[in-house]
Each structure stands twice: as structure tokens, then as C-alpha cells.
Image (spheres, grey):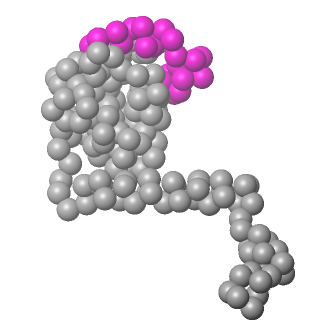
Amino acid sequence: AAANGGATGAEDAAELAARPTHGEESAAARAQAAANVSAWRVKQMPTQRPLEAPRVPADFLKQYALLRKDGPAFFAYLRVIPPADLPRIFSPEVADEVLISIVATMRAHHDATTAAWCVEWLRALSGAPRFEMTVLMLAAAAKRDAAALFDALAESGAAVGDDVRKLYR
């Protein structure tokens, strides 16, 4: 078989041994998928142009998907959204995952100059449709995180009244 261009038994065995196993194929596929997602995120990131406030809920969700793992960038994005627009942007509701991310981001990245803005923004967010239902369904740990955020905002000098705290309990 080798004389007429065919493979020998040894060549067949070497070819089979060189093929990736099922586990290696799925690991390689996962790595390729992760690389594709990273490339897409980099391509979509607003590196040259300034962040713009979302006009519709889909605009917010697109930026949320891109920025949620980059705390400072996500905080900067939240800062460009006027509080008055929040009920319209978070329609038909604020997803629990998004609310948890917003609380965590504000807690990690606010300072004395942004604390009052955070309180105003969170108060306005409570006007979003079905906000009460989202808060009602939050896990106890998420509610504790919100309480800790309000404590941190108060320590930073913001006037955090019981009215806004109650909205997140």
C-alpha cells in the first residue's frame, strides 16, 4: 500500500494518535469561543468616542453586556444616564442581575464627589416599571449589599434618607 501512495498501518496509527481527543476538542472549542467573544467585545468597545446615554432599553443592554465586568467603565457609563430617563430606559423592568451589578459597581467606585449623585440615581431608578417586584424577588444577600451601599454613601457624605433605603429592602 505504501508503494502506490497509500498509508501504511504505522502511518494510520500515527495519524490517529495526532488527532485530538473529544476532551481536547471541546477545550479547544471553548477557547476559540472565548477568543471570539473577546474579539467581539474589543470591536464593540467605545474606545475613541465618548459614552452616550442610551436612547432605548436595547442600547443600555448592549453597553451593559460590554461593560459589566469593567467596574470603572460601567460606573462611567451609569454617570452619563440622566436620572429622569431611567424609567424609560429600564422598561419593561430592571432585571435583578442588572440591579445587583449597579449596586456592586456603585459601592466599589463611588467617592465623596459622586455619592449624592448615586443616591439621586438610585431614587430615580426606583421609578422604573415593576421595580418593587424586582426588589421583592432579590436574594437576602443582594438586599444586604444594597443596605451596605447606602451605608457607604452616607459615610461619603451623601444624604441617604430612610425613604430611599426602604425602596431597596
The residue at the point 35 percent across, 59 percent down is 42
In the rendering, at what x and y percent does residue 85 appear? 17, 25
Residue 146 forms part of the magenta stretch: yes
Q: Main secondary structure of the magenta part?
A: helix
Snapshot quadrant of residue 36: bottom left
Q: Relative to 122, say whether 67 is above or below.
A: below
In the rendering, at what x and y percent does residue 153 appear? 40, 31
Snapshot quadrant of residue 84: top left
The residue at the point 41 percent across, 42 percent down is 68
What are the residue bounds of the magenta stretch?
A: 127-148
Left or right: 156 in relation to 114: right
Split into 4 quadrants, where in the image is the N terminus? bottom right
Q: Relative to 1, say whether 56 is above or below.
A: above
Left or right: 162 in relation to 142: left
Number of numbered discs overlaid on the protein picture: 0
In the rendering, at what x and y percent does residue 47 appear? 25, 60
Between 159 and 12, the one lying in front of the other is 12
Between 73 and 49, the one lying in front of the other is 49
Between 14 and 4, the one lying in front of the other is 4
The residue at the point 70 percent across, 88 percent down is 4
Q: Residue furthest bottom?
A: 3
Q: Relative to 4, say whether 69 is above or below.
A: above
The residue at the point 37 percent across, 46 percent down is 67
Left or right: 148 in relation to 28: left
Residue 50 forms part of the magenta stretch: no
Visible in this render: residue 112?
no
Visible in this render: residue 7?
yes
In the rendering, at what x and y percent does residue 166 appear? 42, 10
